[in-house]
Amino acid sequence: MNRLEERILRDGVVKEGNVLKVGGFLNHVIDVDLMDWMGQEFKRRFEGLQVDKILTIESSGIAIATMAGHYFHVPVLYAKKNPRIVTMDDDKYVADAFSFTHKVTNHVIVTKTYLNPGEKILVIDDFLANGAALTALSSIIEQAGAELVGVGIAVEKGMQGAGDRFRANGMRIESLALIDEMDAETNTIKFR
Ligand code: 5GP
């Protein structure tokens, strides 16, 4: 078992509706040593892959992506999220994503000048659940004419199926903790 899996078992809380609370170390309190390990671990798992930029989505992805950026020595770009109608500026890429945790549709927005054609992009995010956030980020990468070369996820909830669907389509996804089962009543979690 790796460090993130151990921490999830120790401090993660399983809620009804397939939600895992990790506020004590990942997305409310930030355990910097754990983030640092995650950054190094992504670097190790994607060793040899050419990455020009890391793309994530606000807000929980930013800390993890920043640590990864530190080890890859590349800039970290984060997409902004806005649930309200945005004016479709010509200078922005926009894609929609339904939020699994907040049950609203967000516009995911990146300013065009920060994402360039031909750039090799590694996507990093905290969770992969139904895949809406990842679908929106890949759409933005495609709109920019950039290339998605890999995806690094802290916690993948495998039982929601999105990760396996993306892998079957050839996407390279590395998840540091891949959960196959969790039970809110007993607070038990099973990793793949
Ligand atoms: P997806 O778009 O893949 O359905 O969900 C991804 C986003 O939803 C993540 O960026 C994360 O913010 C949030 N999310 C999904 N499932 C969970 C969960 O079980 N716990 C927490 N804390 N966030 C989640």
Image (cartoon, grey):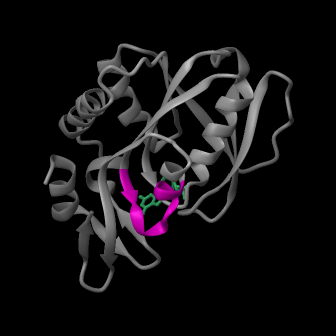
The magenta span reads 155-165
User: Where 121 falls versus 81 (above or below)?
Assistant: above
Which image quarter is the C terminus in? Answer: bottom left
In the rendered structure, does residue 160 fall within the stretch colored magenta? yes
Q: Is residue 166 left or right of residue 154?
A: right
Q: Nearer the viewer, residue 43 or 107?
A: 43
Q: Nearer the viewer, residue 61 or 182?
A: 182
Residue 144 image point, x, y percent: 71, 24
Which image quarter is the N terminus in? Answer: bottom left
Q: Residue at x 53, y 20 (%)?
A: 120
Residue 87 image point, x, y percent: 86, 36
Q: Residue at x 20, y 55 (%)?
A: 5
User: Where 66 falls versus 180 (above or below)?
Assistant: above
In the rendered structure, does residue 126 fall within the stretch colored magenta? no
Q: Residue furthest bottom?
A: 185
Residue 178 image point, x, y percent: 32, 57
Q: Is residue 110 left or right of residue 45?
A: right
User: Where 56 falls versus 164 (above or below)?
Assistant: above
Residue 89 lies in what quarter of the image? top right
Q: Is residue 28 visible?
A: no
What type of secondary structure mainly makes up the magenta span? helix
Question: How many numbered marks does the figure carry?
Answer: 0
User: Where 85 falls versus 187 (above or below)?
Assistant: above
Q: Residue at x 46, y 34 (%)?
A: 150
Q: Is residue 84 left or right of residue 117?
A: right
